[in-house]
Image: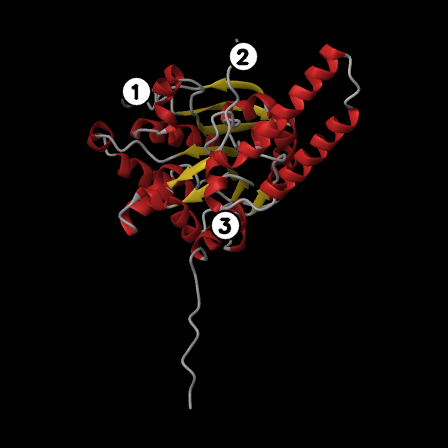
Amino acid sequence: MEKPIYTLEFEKPLRELSAQLDQLRQRSEENKLDLADEIAAIERKISATQREIYSSLSPWQKVQIARHPKRPYALDYVEALFENFQELHGDRQYNDDRALIGGTAFFQGRAVMIVAQQKGRDTKENIQRNFGMAQPEGYRKALRLMRLAEKFGMPVITFIDTPGAFPGIESEERHVSEAIAVNLREMAMLRVPSIAIVVGEGGSGGALGIGVTDRVLIFENSYYSVISPEGCAAILWKDRAAAPQAAEALKINADHLEKLGIVDEVIPEPFGGAHNDLKQSADALRYALLKHLNDLRALSVEQLLDTRYERYRHLGVYEEAGATQH
């Protein structure tokens, strides 16, 4: 039996049209009828509806696409873009966090270190991956791997996809905030090029814990934010149902983030989201990664550190218009 296709609320008109198209095709085959005109009309309507829906997505709708259960995760991109990925385990202090993975690989024939947040596809895997929410040992593992990359002169490529670091009592007992803070400091001083890619959710300090890099790229329908829209809505509106308003106010989508200088490039996605065509999404990422890695490799270590410092010093800088003097 076929599994039902996951449909977001705003995609339901498309799903209904697709069902009509399937029915027409089935009738045409079963009854040997010429329904070419009717089929062509539905196909035109589907194309028009797609353009109407996906060309004017609200920030909240983009958040929903970023959370789509079929959206490509880090390991999907690793498999599509890298060769000989060798996963490395453990933080050498406590445990191996499966929500945050990493290891060596080759990209276009050159060695790199991959650090990635990984979600699960089903309930069992999501429990193993803790829904992509890393604990302190995950961030310490990430730092261990980044220091290893620095030792052997390998660029660091991180994949961000988390609603946030795990907020449980045991995570706090093992000092998750301290683990993230150390990563922020140490990533700022890494003596090798680094690139972060937001492939889905980029939530809070959990995302930033592997995000202090020379370049930050983001997929078109991903988001990157200090807090989730629901969390913001609960604090400011006292109602999580106000999440769509919060998503708009937070300016968390790719186009806003690029205008604000938070991210360096927005990677285009296929119509309807990256889950509709992994190959096209991976090809777009390959092109962007190659371009930015080549740019960063051309810099000396001193230039790399100075440029990174300036990048983060300028985030959040704003000017106030002075009062008119008479």
- Seen from the viewer's position, the closer of residues 130 and 244 is 244
- Seen from the viewer's position, the closer of residues 226 and 181 is 226
Residue 108 placement, left or right of 135: right
Q: CA distance from mark 2 to mark 3?
A: 39 Å
Q: State whether residue 191 appears in this view.
A: no
Residue at the spot of label 3: 257
Q: CA distance from mark 3 to mark 1?
A: 35 Å
Residue sitting at x 57%, y 34%: 13
Residue sitting at x 63%, y 35%: 271
Number of numbered discs visible in the structure rendering: 3
Q: Residues within 10 Å of mark 1 (few under 14, many from 20)?
A: some
Q: Position of residue 175 (x, y in %)?
A: 24, 34
- Seen from the viewer's position, the closer of residues 63 and 102 is 63
Q: State whether residue 309 appears in this view.
A: yes
Above/below status of 274 relative to 307: above
Residue at the spot of label 2: 2
Among the 4 quarters of the image, the one containing residue 118? top left
Tell me the kind of residue under disc 1: Asn
Of the two numbered discs 3 and 1 on the same chain, state the one appearing first in sequence: 1
Above/below status of 208 relative to 310: above
Q: CA distance from mark 2 to mark 1?
A: 39 Å
Tell me the kind of residue under disc 2: Glu
Q: Position of residue 261 (x, y in %)?
A: 51, 53
Q: Position of residue 184 (x, y in %)?
A: 37, 42
- Seen from the viewer's position, the closer of residues 173 and 24 is 24
Mark 2 falls on what kind of element?
A: loop
Viewer-nearest of discs 3 and 1: 3
Mark 1 falls on what kind of element?
A: loop
Q: Residues within 10 Å of mark 3 (few under 14, many from 20)?
A: some
Quarter of the image with the C terminus is bottom left
Above/below status of 96 relative to 216: above
Residue at the spot of label 1: 95
